[in-house]
Amino acid sequence: MTFRDMHKKGDPFILANAWDIGSAKMLVALGAKAIATSSAAHGFTLGLPDGTVTRDLALSHAETLVAAVNVPVQGDFENGWGDDPDTVAETVRLAAEIGLAGICIEDTVLPGQAPYDRALAVERICAAAAAARALPRDFFLVARADGCLTDGYDLSEALARVRGYDKAGADGVYVPAPGTLADLAAVVAATDKPVNALAAGPFLSHNRADFAAIGVARISLGSSLARATHRVIRDAGKAMFGAGDFSPMANGLSAAEVDGYLKDKTNEP
């Protein structure tokens, strides 16, 4: 099944965001049918805040994941690393060259949180879509409306942007943190294109069946899983450096089990 074919309304697959080769291999061994990078989680590994990783670093990181697993890999590619549409189109071409199955492009003027003007945001997706369609192989382009996440605009503006991105040629759309499941259902209703849901924040209380019931086509993790691992580090660190208590590490997996996931045959190219 191709990456595009995985996107089925009402039957969402889990797009598992990894941050290194080990996490990518382990997620595939556990059942992930596709992997994505995470700009925030990748930034964690470099000691950099989200929105500050360069395009070259992101491409190199994504290429290592493509080589490490035998499932499709998508790039979480920020705002395309440029304000102008031509730069975004070039990012699409570079992403395809390293073997990515697709990318997400957001509408935030990085490294800040202000959104692009809607007309420019749509123009950027139009250029990205044209570049994707000109490629010699299939490439799945997702347009992100990030204003609800960044407080840059409200749901009504997000819906207007979703419709604009749909018409501009995006293959899928994504509104991170729209507020409630009902708000997410409104996003799904605003387009015929596959909609990505983010399993983060209050949406962690919903299961796959809940997302399926409103017509979501895929569920990504963003940096949620990476932040969960960092919580383990924080809790263990506070215990050992505060009270000399090493017990929080007692529930860790055995080295043999971890090795088993990393050597799982599903990861063989």
Image (cartoon, rainbow, N blue to C red):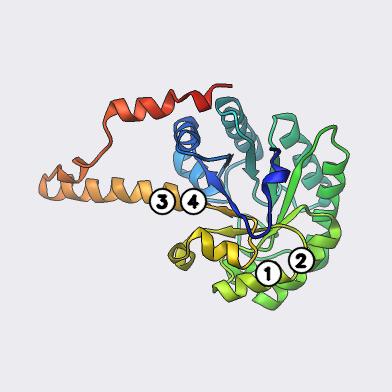
Is label 3 in contact with label 4 (beta carbons under 8 Å)? yes
Picture quarter with the C terminus: top right
Say left or right for 258 vs 131.
left
User: Residue sitting at 63 percent across and 61 percent down?
Assistant: 216
Mark 3 neighbour class, 10 Å CA radius: few under 14, some 14 to 19, many 20 or more: some
As measured in the structure, the alpha-carbon distance from the residue carrying label 3 to the one carrying label 4 is 6 Å
Residue behind mark 3:
227
Which label number is shown at residue 191? 2
Picture quarter with the N terminus: top right
Q: Earlier in the sequence, mark 1 or mark 3?
A: 1
Is label 4 in contact with label 2 (beta carbons under 8 Å)? no
How far across and how far down the image is residue 226, in percent?
43, 47
Residue behind mark 4:
223
As measured in the structure, the alpha-carbon distance from the residue carrying label 4 to the one carrying label 2 is 26 Å
Which is closer to the viewer, label 1 or label 4? Answer: 1
SS class, disc 2: loop
Q: Amino acid at mark 1?
A: Val
Q: Nearer the viewer, residue 144 or 140?
A: 140
Mark 4 neighbour class, 10 Å CA radius: few under 14, some 14 to 19, many 20 or more: many
Which label number is shown at residue 124? none
User: Residue sitting at 86 percent across and 43 percent down?
Assistant: 133
